[in-house]
Image: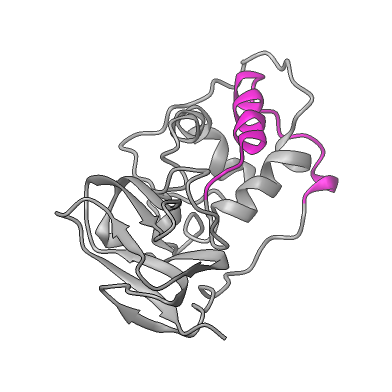
Amino acid sequence: MRWLTFALALPAIVQAHDPISTKLTWAQEISRIVYKRCVGCHRPEGKSPMSLLTYEDARPWAKAIKEQVLNRQMPPWGAVKGFGDFSNDASLTQDEMNRIAEWVEGGAPEGDTIYLPPTPKPVPAPALPRGVRTRTVTGPVELLGIRPMISAESTQVVAHLPDGSAIPLLWLRNYKAAWNRTFVYREPVILPRGVRIEANPRVRFEFLIRNPK
């Protein structure tokens, strides 16, 4: 899947003689994060330029992975956390980021392979909720998701309700249209009649909506 793709020219190699100063290991902790977040693309014959399926695959890239993770460039997601609650959020949690950084800074140890989880198999992309795509929202509707059709633009999408309140829907930063992603809400956002959607006028969106039950 494209949302887990990042490209690097050369691996930032962790030297084999780096001192080990962490209890975190690939076998027990880091592989589980990578299997959950990364190997959809970072696997043999995947869409990414390198595999991260094994310790031998991942270790030469350890420092580069840390940099990409801390800069929130891996896995690519494009939406700012806390601005909308999405069920298909592919980004790392702060704890996952901290663990990867600590593992790399601590020498990127492998650990005892007896603790390795089963090798994950490729999984199909999750199905989107059933709804109607539209480029305008007038309400009353249930908003299921938003699909941006932009590249290298940043914008906030906010729903302004008739009572003067506002609902933050989506905040994009460094999103690429090639990802072709719909941001799916964990719970439908109820938008009443007379709602006004505010966003960058240069940006086009499709809204996945359905009529209220």
**Res 3 → quadrant:** bottom left
User: Measuring 34% from the left and 44% from the top, which residue is drawn there?
Assistant: 7
**Res 198 → quadrant:** bottom left
74 lies left or right of 52:
left
Percent x, y for residue 39? 55, 56
Q: The C terminus is located in which quarter?
A: bottom right
Percent x, y for residue 162? 39, 61
183 lies left or right of 107:
left
Percent x, y for residue 41? 47, 59
User: Measuring 42% from the left and 48% from the top, which residue is drawn there?
Assistant: 79
User: Measuring 55% from the left and 55% from the top, which residue is drawn there?
Assistant: 85
Q: Which sits in the foreground, 79 or 49?
A: 79
Q: Please, is residue 136 above or below residue 151 in the view? A: below
Q: Which sits in the foreground, 145 or 9?
A: 145
Give yes or no for residue 106 being in the magenta stretch. Answer: yes
Give yes or no for residue 7 being in the magenta stretch. Answer: no
Q: Which sits in the foreground, 7 or 3?
A: 3
Q: Please, is residue 60 above or below residue 203 in the view? A: above
Which portion, as a residue range, is magenta?
91-116
Percent x, y for residue 171? 38, 47
User: Measuring 41% from the left and 59% from the top, which residue is drawn there?
Assistant: 161
Q: Which sits in the foreground, 25 or 187?
A: 187
